[in-house]
Amino acid sequence: MAKKNAVSVDFKIIESNNTVKSILSFTKSKKIDLVIMGSSGRGSFDKILLSSVSNDVLQKAKCPALITK
C-alpha cells in the first residue's frame, strides 16, 4: 500500500540486551521522524515487560512514537 502511494517505508531489526537504549540510539543516528511499535496481548509477566519498553520509548524518544495493539 505504501509503495502504491509512493510513501517511503523502512524498517530495521536490532538485537540487543538493552532494547530501549538501542531503539533510541538508532532513531537518533538515522534521524527517524516516527517510531511505530506494537504492544502484545501476551501473559501478564510478558505484558509488563513489553509495556515498560513501549512506555520508556514513548517517554524518552525525541520524535513521536506510535504504540499499536
Image (cartoon, rainbow, N blue to C red):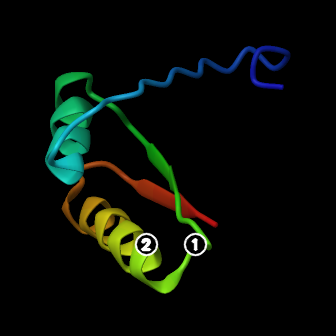
Q: Nearer the viewer, residue 62 or 20?
A: 20
Residue sitting farthest toward the bottom? 44
**Which image quarter: residue 50?**
bottom left
Please give the residue where the numbered disc 1 appears in the rendered image.
42
Question: Within 10 Å of the Cα at label 1, are there few (<14), some (14-19), or many (20+) other Cα atoms?
Answer: few
Residue 46, position in %: x, y? 43, 72
Q: Which residue is drawn at 41% across and 27% down?
A: 13
Quarter of the picture containing the C terminus is bottom right
Q: Residue at x 20, y 44 (%)?
A: 24
Q: Which residue is drawn at 33% across and 64% down?
A: 58
Q: Check disc 1 and report its element: helix, strand or loop.
A: loop
Q: Which amino acid does label 2 sit on?
A: Asp
Q: Which of 43 and 57 is in front in this view?
A: 43
Residue 23, position in %: x, y? 26, 41
Circle on res. 21: none
Q: Nearer the viewer, residue 17 or 58?
A: 17
Q: In this view, does 41 lie to the left or right of 67?
A: right
User: With respect to residue 41, does 29 lie above or below?
Assistant: above
Quarter of the picture containing the N terminus is top right
Q: Are marks 1 and 2 in contact (CB under 8 Å)?
A: yes
Number of numbered discs visible in the structure rendering:
2
Q: In this view, does 9 lie to the left or right of 45?
A: right
Q: Check disc 2 and report its element: helix, strand or loop.
A: helix
Question: Within 10 Å of the Cα at label 2, are there few (<14), some (14-19), or many (20+) other Cα atoms?
Answer: few
Q: Which residue is drawn at 68% across and 21% down?
A: 7
Residue 51, position in %: x, y? 39, 73
Please give the residue where the numbered disc 2 appears in the rendered image.
46
User: With respect to residue 30, does 15 lie above or below?
Assistant: below
Q: What residue type is labelled 1?
A: Arg
